Amino acid sequence: MKTAIRAALAAALFTSVSAPAAFAAEPPHGAEHPGVQSVLDRAVSEAGLPGARAEVRDGDSTWFGTAGTADLATGREITANERFRIGSTTKTFVATVVLQLAAEQRLSLDHSVEHWLPGLVDGHGYDGSRITVRQLLNHTSGVFNYAEDPTLGEKFVGTPFLQHRFDDFTPRQLVETALANGPKFAPGTGFAYSDTNYALAGMIVEKATGRSLPQEIAERITKPLRLKNTYEPAADDMRIHGPHGRYYSQLMAKDVDTAPVYDVTDLNPSWGYASGDMISTSGDLNTFFRALLEGHLLPPAQQREMFTMQDPQGHWIPDTQYGLGVASQRLSCGTVWGMGGAINGSWSYTFGTRDGRHLLSTEVNGDWAKGKFGSPIGVFTAELEAEFCPKSPAVPS
């Protein structure tokens, strides 16, 4: 089965697909995307971000735009090949690997966590035999999010982060930290976005394959797609290798107008693990999501599983739904599909039409936003509206 998936991928990676009905047919955009460029400019001038980038891939054409700087110390421009941390978009890669293993019958989405990780999810109100792999991937497990643990918050929110940014964690430590808090709800009875779900999913991948998660992601996704700028770093690898800018944080300060800005480019990604530690570029992310949306990475049955969406019922980002490692976002003129991620100093989004032919990948090298945008997500939503709904008045001004 794995060989068949890769053969299909190699043969059909760049095949054409007709435009989706959710969007009106538009002529090719050519080289200019003034709406997106305007939002990038405003991300710097109004939201106060150091820099912003976007790559639009529409059919066979590609456009890259920037605003601001890649490095506040030197003022140099952002370039298209620069790498950045992609945060929770890591989850899409992990979910794809899990679904490929399901297609190969090496695991089942209906398997329990207890089946693969016996004794790990037990106690404090948890019963791993009642939580399925599917519930991990779509955030309906009820497992507490370790990122919300108060003891971690004492180390990673505010200036203590500067002292603890190089702390090392194992996946088991992250899970045990979460489990000490008790479940949010009984498995399958609600939705709660939880990084712990993907820490468990990553551990299951390693248990099912006998190989590390970085090896599986490389063998199954980044190598076949020739994503030369995309990798999952080793737990103790603090640097971004290859071309990259600097990435800045206000350390989750509430007053973004007056909070100081810190360079947090180097950090230990082990606390992200399978939920948010990967590094990539806008171009690689567009290539990955095109292949995924076009159906070249998963067989039809697993593709349907991935894009079976859950309504967060107000417990996540407004106007979004969540599948297995992917999200959909409702715009004023239709729906786009993809995923976003946030980590200290870098927020990013990659979304596009359901057929994968029209995509926008964007990133800002700061983790705040002043004024009307409210957060980097406000910047990204404005970009999506400008690109996919150019005749709509929905973009904030």
Image (spheres, rainbow, N blue to C red):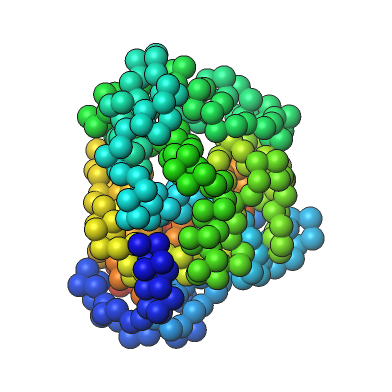
Number of numbered markers: 0
- Front position in the image: 365 or 368: 365
The residue at 28%/26% (across/down) is 130
Q: Position of residue 185 (x, y in %)?
A: 29, 23
The residue at 37%/66% (across/down) is 5
Which of the 4 image quadrants contains residue 294? bottom left
- 324 on left or right of 227: left
Q: Image quadrant for the N terminus? A: bottom left
In the orientation shown, which residue stands out farthest toward the right? 74
Q: Image quadrant for the C terminus? A: bottom left
Can you see residue 353? no
- Front position in the image: 306 or 127: 127
The residue at 46%/54% (across/down) is 93
The residue at 44%/43% (across/down) is 208
Q: Position of residue 339 (x, y in %)?
A: 41, 54
Residue 208 against residue 142 in the figure, above or below: below
Q: Position of residue 323 (x, y in %)?
A: 30, 49
Residue 261 against residue 121 in the figure, above or below: below
- 14 on left or right of 163: left
Q: Position of residue 291 (x, y in %)?
A: 40, 69
- Front position in the image: 140 or 313: 140
In the orientation shown, which residue stands out farthest toward the left? 21
Can you see residue 161? yes
Residue 375 against residue 348 in the figure, above or below: above
Residue 204 against residue 320 in the figure, above or below: above
